C-alpha cells in the first residue's frame, strides 16, 4: 500500500512510520497474554480500491480471515468508502479504507 517496511527495535517491537502517524506492533509490556478488542478496528488508508483488494488478498494468504461483508463500497450518511475488512491471525479486526470523493 506504499508504506515503507517496518523497523524492528532491540526489544522486538515493529514500528511503521508514515506522514500521518506511527503504527506499532509489540508483545504486551505488562507480560499478560495479548488479546483483541471486540468493537475495535485498526484502519489503514489505501490510495485506490485495487490497493485495498491487494492488501486484503495478501492478508488472507498469510493467515488472516475475511470478516464483515466482502471488500466493496459502503455508503453512509456522510461519505462513501471502499472498505476491506479482515481479522489477523491473532484475531484483531483490521481494515483498508479508500475514501470515495463525491
Image: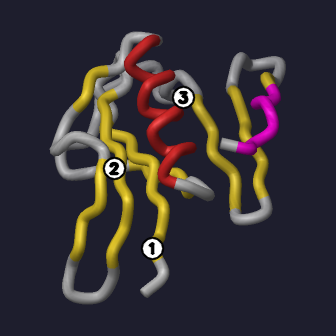
Q: Which residue is mark 1?
A: 100
Residue 46, given in percent of the width and then of the height, sits at: 57, 54
User: Which residue shows up at 69% across the image and 52% down it?
Assistant: 22
Question: Is 38 left, or right, of 26 in this rendering?
Answer: left
Decide: few, some or many residues near mark 3? Use Cα within 10 Å; few <14, some 14-19, many ≥20: few
Question: Is 1 left, or right, of 50 in this rendering?
Answer: right
Read off the magenta span: 2-7
Residue 24 within the magenta-colored segment of the rendering: no
Question: Is 83 left, or right, of 66 in this rendering?
Answer: right
User: Which residue shows up at 37% across the image and 67% down it?
Assistant: 81
Q: Are marks 1 and 3 in contact (CB under 8 Å)?
A: no
Decide: few, some or many residues near mark 1? Use Cα within 10 Å; few <14, some 14-19, many ≥20: some
Residue 87, given in percent of the width and then of the height, sits at: 30, 30
Q: For the residues marked 2 and 1, what is the alpha-carbon distance in whole angstroms?
A: 20 Å
User: Which residue shows up at 58% across the image and 31% down it?
Assistant: 25
Residue 15, given in percent of the width and then of the height, sits at: 73, 36
Q: Which residue is mark 2?
A: 41
Q: For the residues marked 1 and 3, what is the alpha-carbon distance in whole angstroms?
A: 38 Å
Q: For the residues marked 2 and 3, what is the alpha-carbon distance in whole angstroms?
A: 21 Å
Q: Which mark's residue is nearer the viewer, 1 or 3? A: 1
User: Which residue shows up at 74% across the image and 44% down it?
Assistant: 2
Q: Which residue is mark 3?
A: 29
For residue 69, above or below residue 20: above
**Element under label 3?**
loop
Label located before the other in sequence (2 or 3): 3
Q: Main secondary structure of the magenta part?
A: loop
**Element under label 1?**
strand
Tell me which corner region of the image, top left, top right, bottom left or bottom right, holds residue 74: bottom left
**The C terminus sits in image quarter:** bottom left
Amino acid at each position: 500500500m506504499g508504506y515503507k517496511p517496518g523497523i524492528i527495535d532491540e526489544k522486538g517491537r515493529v514500528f511503521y512510520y508514515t506522514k500521518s502517524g506511527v503504527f506499532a506492533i509489540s508483545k504486551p509490556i505488562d507480560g499478560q497474554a495479548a488479546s483483541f478488542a471486540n468493537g475495535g478496528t485498526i484502519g489503514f488508508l489505501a490510495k485506490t480500491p485495487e490497493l485495498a483488494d491487494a492488501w486484503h488478498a495478501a492478508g488472507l494468504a498469510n493467515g488472516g480471515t475475511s470478516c464483515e461483508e466482502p471488500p466493496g463500497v459502503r455508503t453512509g450518511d456522510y461519505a462513501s468508502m471502499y472498505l476491506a475488512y479482515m481479522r489477523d491471525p491473532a484475531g484483531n479486526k483490521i481494515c483498508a479504507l479508500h475514501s470515495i470523493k463525491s
